[in-house]
Image: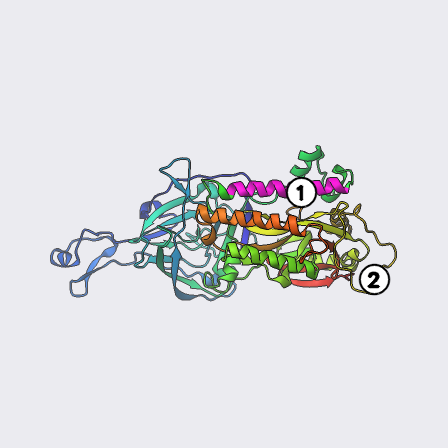
Amino acid sequence: MSITIEINDLKVQITTTPLSQEEFAPFGDVITNPRPDLHPVTYASHGGPLPYDGISANQGTAIRYANVSRPRNHYAQAPSGNGELIMSQFVCATRQLALTSNPSQLEFSVSVLERHPFTSQTFSPLASTASHYLVIVAPSLPPSSLDEGLPVPSGDGLPGRGPPDIRSLRAFVATAEQAVTYGAGTWHAPMVALGNPEETLDFLVIQFASGVALEDCQLALFESTGLGEPNIKNKLEDLSGIVLKPGENPYGALLNACDQNPSQIQALYAAHRTKRNAQQKEKFLAADFKELIIDQYLLRLEVPTIQPGFQDERNCLVIWARPPDHIVRLAAKLQELLKDAAPGIWLMPMHRMHMTALEVAFSKTPEEIASLVAKLRPAIPDIVNFLFSHRSRLVKPMISYDLSAFAVSFLPAAGEPGVSPEPVVPLVKEGTTVEGDSYTYHHVRRDIFDKVQDAGIEIGSRYQVPSAHITLGRYLNNDDHDTPEKRQKWIQAIDSVNEWLEKEIWDKPDSEFIGEWVVGQERGLDARNGPLWYGGGRTIMMGEGF
């Protein structure tokens, strides 16, 4: 389970310090030989006081230091009521630091912190090729709505509820001769091993666990509007000076800003994706490139050894458009071309491909989503069947991308020739069918927004930007992008694919692949809820296709 913290333009820069018990004491323990200058045999002969009640042991051939760190098990307060001691081995690849304007300084960006509320966690280095690692921690803020409902224990010395205070972040450089224990509930970054790309640093990890993901590990993800889609309010103000009023339909406001003109609407969508691609290309090829934004949820789902038993508990309610078979074929071809350039990317399974027409709510509990579904249910049949009588076209596919994902995006049609396969016979048109390019996909989004709002639902979409896209994949690691040459190869592959699309696919009726999508062909809208980020969840109702 996670909380998401919007950091917007906040940038906190801190300088690392060497790891020591004195500096780290508010967050846990540092375990290291307190007297590396003292040989056990010498001590056995001379004796004397030692830290941690040290005594001679093993017939004078060892020194035993007592209680250098105390494991903590607070699972008696957890909902499960039980936690068992587990010992794991982590083999950690080194993380490459980014260059800065100062040649003597390197930089690591923190995008996620985690805490284990009911247990301490000890990382003890084993003999490895790498010899240093970063320890990044943060104190807790007072309890807030961000982590409301997350189970935590109470008691002296425990931080309790509260998101991380990122303004008070601390970072330490540890050596392979130092083990570290994070206190129960301490916010900390996942392990950051340092060294050359081919090196690893192994750890023996000791903690308690119940096997219940919500109890064993809680995440805090940092999101910035600068790294995601720009807010539609800012976009509209940039275009026309209009300001969204509370409760106003953002899609309708954009249509009015474009005078309902399909050519202007298409131009807006085109400008959005072209400008965004240019910005992302600049980031990929920058001399101070830091790293990709790895989806920590997807990483744990795809690599379950990172956190056994992890479950994505971000429940959502959405209205999806499902692509027809010829668009799925095109998307699969694009995935194939991109995977040739970056073999380690994660690809969206073809049967899960979708385009979000409207995000109604996100990151809610199952109970909250169930309440929304119950309220929306009477309106769902009309919503999911809406495309049967309101048909819009999308054209001119292109790869759009950023540091976290890549997609195939489309533009609302504006007079291009029709090239889609004929709908399945018999061709049924009940009542008045709205079609023609004066009714765009953005009009569809406007009307679906109104229908959901009219059902009494307060819509909680994150983004309402001029974009119509199917996510093709995400990055699971930096392996394919950890050198300037590899990043250049990735950008060249995307540019090459986009050139092929424009030359061979756009508006071509006789191409091997078809680039036009009449939204609603073969499948109506899909009202869906559950953990949906990667195409999952369940269908509440699927509308009729044509």
| Residue drawn at (68%, 50%) of the image | 506
Q: How is the image coloured?
A: rainbow
Q: Position of residue 460 (x, y in %)?
A: 67, 49
Q: Amino acid at mark 1?
A: Ala
In this orientation, which residue lies closer to the viewer: 348 or 1?
Answer: 348
In this orientation, which residue lies closer to the viewer: 140 or 305?
Answer: 305
In this orientation, which residue lies closer to the viewer: 115 or 11?
Answer: 11
Left or right for 537, reference 195: right
Give the farthest residue toward the left. 45
What stretch of residues is rendered in magenta? 262-283
Tell me if residue 183 is in the magenta stretch: no
Residue 427 against residue 234 in the figure, above or below: below
What residue is shown with label 2? 427
Q: Which corner quadrant holds the N terminus? A: bottom right
What residue is shown with label 1? 270
For marks 1 and 2, give the CA distance: 32 Å
